[in-house]
Amino acid sequence: MKLHGIHVPHKKNTAKQPPVRLAPPQTVAIPMSMHIGRPAKPLVKRGDEVKVGTKIGEADGYISAPVHASVSGKVQKIDEITIMNGAKVPCIVIESDGLQTPDETITPPEVHDLSSFIDAVKNSGSVGLGGAGFPTFVKFVTKDLSVFQEVVINAAECEPYITSDTRTMLDRGDAVFRGIEALKKYLGVKKFIIGIENNKPEAIAAMQQRAAKTEGVQVHVLPAMYPQGGEKVLVYNTTGKIIPKGGLPLDVGVIVINVTTLAFIAEYLETGKPLVEKCVTVDGSAVKEPKNVIAPIGMSISDVLEAAGGTKSEPAKVLYGGPMMGIAVPSLDSPILKNTNAIVAMDAKEAKPPKTTPCISCGACINHCPLRLDPRGIARAYKLGSAEDLEKLCVDLCMECGCCSYICPAHRPLVQTNKLAKAVLRNYQNAKKEGKS
Amino acid sequence: MNRLISSVSPHFHTPRDTQKIMLDVIIALSPAAVASVILFGWRALLVIAVCVGTCVLSEFLFEKLCKRENTVSDLSAVVTGMILAFNLPVTIPVWQAMLGSVIAIIVVKQLFGGIGQNFANPAATARIIMLVAFSGEMTRWVNPSGFFTDMDAVSGATPLVAMTKGADVPSYLDMFLGNHGGSLGETCALALLLGGVYLLVRRVITWHAPVAFLGTVALMSLVCGKDVLGQLLSGGLLIAAIFMATDYASTPNTKWGKLVFGVGCGLITVLIRFWGNYPEGVSYSILIMNILTPYIAKLTRSKPLIGGVEQ
């Protein structure tokens, strides 16, 4: 059985460009929430001196992540920022002294078993760097090591434009494999699969070359078809296992980890330097010189765009991430986040929304959904307000990859409707649960 | 202050839209249109023009009247007009062709909600209504008499009628090239197949319904001891299999649904052809299967990948 998907333009213009490290900007604004879960609690106040790597936010609760200063300098103020889910969280603004002095208290973590490994990963501030932003350590927490059967390393990078994971494989390939060794040692996993789309031959070669010398590592070359990097799709295509609805990869014995996240963990274990900077692909039709950059977390998009060579036309829409699942930022002041892997700045022509016309019942949405949902049926059930039908249609399975909306010749907002329909179903199911209890 | 567009992902969309799809169908229908003019003369072009013109005009006026959004530019009315014209004899009076077009667009398509909402194929349904209303004119066939010649000279039977009556049947080559009596766009198998290949290459249609349809007719002809090639090349089978059994709105969307639809069309077609009173049953088979489409769709719905159990 083959999963469906779509062929999107690749636009991997920056694949051959090693990232350029940007000079620190005058100020950075670091939100306390750059992950899924509770925002971190600020540890600094106005006027405090911080250095690169100083912890400025403490993880709050179990699913949370600490936050570290990305520049050396002085805390200018503690602001408030609206994050993508609409919540308002504190945001620490640091005025850079331009020196990038590292925090001298930083030392490599002491890791000798699973629990100290998990602590180290937690303290590193690591979150899913592929874009999801899920705190990494949570994936490794278990009472029984035997549940970890295999690790799938997500290097598919199926979104158009983005090449930051490609660069990780080319520039930090050894770190990826040191990360694999660490997982072998602390999690006891013996089987590793690196999933890469076939449009990255150099990255595939770089990984294969090292995999040949490492036991238990297999490079799985996948056809370049969006959304190959979607967790459910990737796990199915590399292992043949289906992650159950509402479940996690671990339910089928799999850990999925992004290739850049893995490289970062390996580097953290050696240096103790927390997550304070990100390799970001800067591309899009409005960008003058598409390139990869290494930017301190909290640097504003306008600073990044300027430092990366400027724009050739006024950006009409700017995205965190790629064009398929990326989030349109409200303003150019928005900061680079931990899980930002690309900034795509579109000019007016590229950003022009398509005209929606009546559904012609062509079935393209059904025949391209990787999870075999019926977006047309879901849209109809949503319009009728029928939560029962939405439940039957399994709208809660939708991973919001956007294949349906991309492929629809009538340009109907299908995945957008799915998102709304998921909320309707969630409310309905919650109400049902409350009614029972 | 720089104003940014804020919208929910995805931010990329396929360049293919409804209009481009319909344009592809029009391109695919063009070889048959050219063939009809070569075979039946200029009047074929007149019939096509009348049908297309009336279809587009009815759509425009009806939507204007109902204050609906105007959808003439999606070109679907042009496609309906062309397919309907292809299903009419070249001698059809202009007013009847116009009436058929009005029925196709207003009664079958617009009254059910316009593009994408019609449960039945507009052209097939309009043809059936015309066949009932104007049975004389709708079955007055002429033999192709060449370009620019007087076509009223020879009136001839279609191969299907000839087969039923045991009269002389044209050679396979003549049937393949369309050199025999019949509706103006259905006779030239070569032109229709060209169009079908184009639609497949452009991925406007999939092979499932046409192959299931034609395969069933071929198999049943073989089983019943009929002339297999003759059955495949005659009547409206090819135009229906390629252009009507692949209509988006009135046929199932999944590949299994399409296969069931095609097999059903094939069975009904041979049932009518071999044992019915009418020599031809293609339009009826399309209409009956259109009506069954919601049930087929329900039975062949794809199962979401929910996991838990191996599929």
Image (cartoon, rainbow, N blue to C red):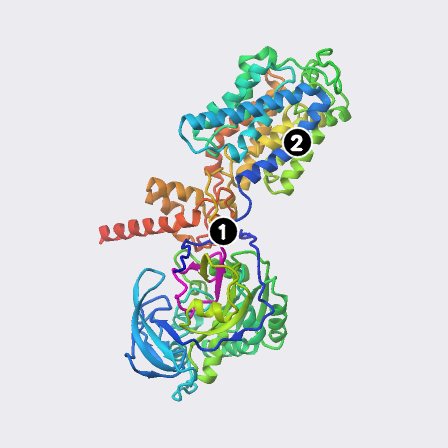
Residue behind mark 1: A403
Q: Disc 1 sits on a residue from what chain?
A: A
Q: Disc 2 sits on a residue from what chain?
A: B
Residue behind mark 2: B30
Numbered mark located on residue A169 in the image: none
Q: Which residues are magenta?
A: A321-348
Which kind of residue does numbered mark 2 sit on? Answer: Ser
Q: Position of residue A278 (x, y in %)?
A: 47, 73
Q: Is residue B286 above or below residue A269?
A: above
Dot in front, 2 or 1: 2
Q: Quadrant of the C terminus of chain A?
A: bottom left
Q: Residue furthest front?
A: B1
Which kind of residue does numbered mark 1 sit on? Answer: Cys
Q: Decide which of A83, A274 is in the foreground and name it.
A: A83
The answer as to whether the residues below labels 2 and 1 share one chain is no
Q: CA distance from mark 2 to mark 1?
A: 32 Å
